[in-house]
Amino acid sequence: MATLGRGLDALLVRKKNSSAAIEGDGSVTEVPIGNVDVNPHQPRRDFDEEQLQSLADSIAQYGILQPLVVTKQGSRYELIAGERRLRAAQLAGLLTVPIVIRSADEHTKVALALIENIQRVDLNPIELAFAYKRLFDEFHMTHQDIGKRLGKSRPVISNTLRFLSLPQSIQDALREGKITEVIGRTILSLPTEHERIAFFERVIEKKFSGREAQRELDRTTVRPHSRKVRDTALLAKEEELRGRFGTRVTINKVGQHGTISLAFYSEDEYRTLVQRLMDA
């Protein structure tokens, strides 16, 4: 982006109208705020009102430091990235906003909107999962491809997508911040919907932290006929392997014999796990 080389002042937009830069693909220009439409492909659905007002206060004082990314639609503009900044600018009463115009057909625009918004905003786990799913379903990107484009590991992508297999009540709790991603992953390790809902309700009732939820799960999944608490060394090794393979790992060891089980939840995860085990 050419204007970035001119420093911070090139990106500042004051509350008062100022002369626009040369308009063109990749250049920064100012346009009336009412001429910018939101993007229907925006993955974010929930905007924190308090945070939005805080951003609006900052914009009212200092202006917008980063231009909105748009495509031209006749005499209007459609957002690719920057809806949170646009909403905050509206709250701040700005008359114009800085934009960067990109040429993009409808299909490419969807991909750009998803990728740029994933990179730029703090999406909740369910919003992220739906964004990854669209890249997977509509653009036939593998979990590995998505991870490379976003600078994340394949297990992170796969594990985030698995949140969409949770019951709706648990998805809502993740979306609203009532439970953390760590607790969400702990719930995912349970095999049935009934067990997941029951454990989720216990987590909410007891107000467990992520670590407390994991300890509770480890305690309650000990076989009923066994009086022994699980070996902490085995639990630590399971956690280490879980981090390496990005999935639930169970170690059953008696004396010098036992089994190590790795869980997978899709054909893609199965193929990836097999390949990683063959390469090990």
Image (tube, helix red, strand yellow):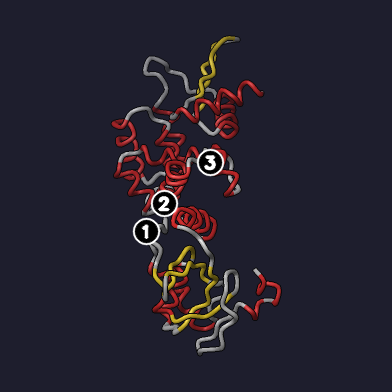
Q: Is residue 261 above or below residue 216?
A: above
In percent of width and height, residue 89 lies at 45, 77
Q: Secondary structure at mark 1?
A: loop
Residue at numbered disc 1: 45
Residue 20 in view, yes or no: yes
Instruction: Say whether marks 2 and 1 touch (CB < 8 Å).
Output: yes
Please give the name of the residue rendered at 70% of the width and 77% of the height, measured from the top-left corner: 6
Check disc 3 and give the amino acid type. Answer: Val
| Mark number, residue 175 | none
Q: Position of residue 224 (x, y in %)?
A: 37, 18
Viewer-proximal residue among 138 and 53: 138
Distance of label 2 from label 1 (alpha carbons) = 7 Å
Q: Residues within 10 Å of mark 1 (few under 14, many from 20)?
A: few
Instruction: Tell me the residue that label 3 is attached to.
Output: 156
Q: Position of residue 170 (x, y in %)?
A: 33, 43
| Earlier residue among tags 2 and 1 | 1
Sooner in the amino-acid sequence: mark 2 or mark 3: 2
Reply above or below: 256 against 155.
Answer: above
Which class describes the residues within 10 Å of circle 3: few (<14), some (14-19), or many (20+)? some
Q: In the shown orientation, is residue 191 left or right of residue 145?
A: left
Q: Which residue is mark 2?
A: 127
For badge 1, the amino acid type reads: Arg
Quarter occupied by residue 7? bottom right
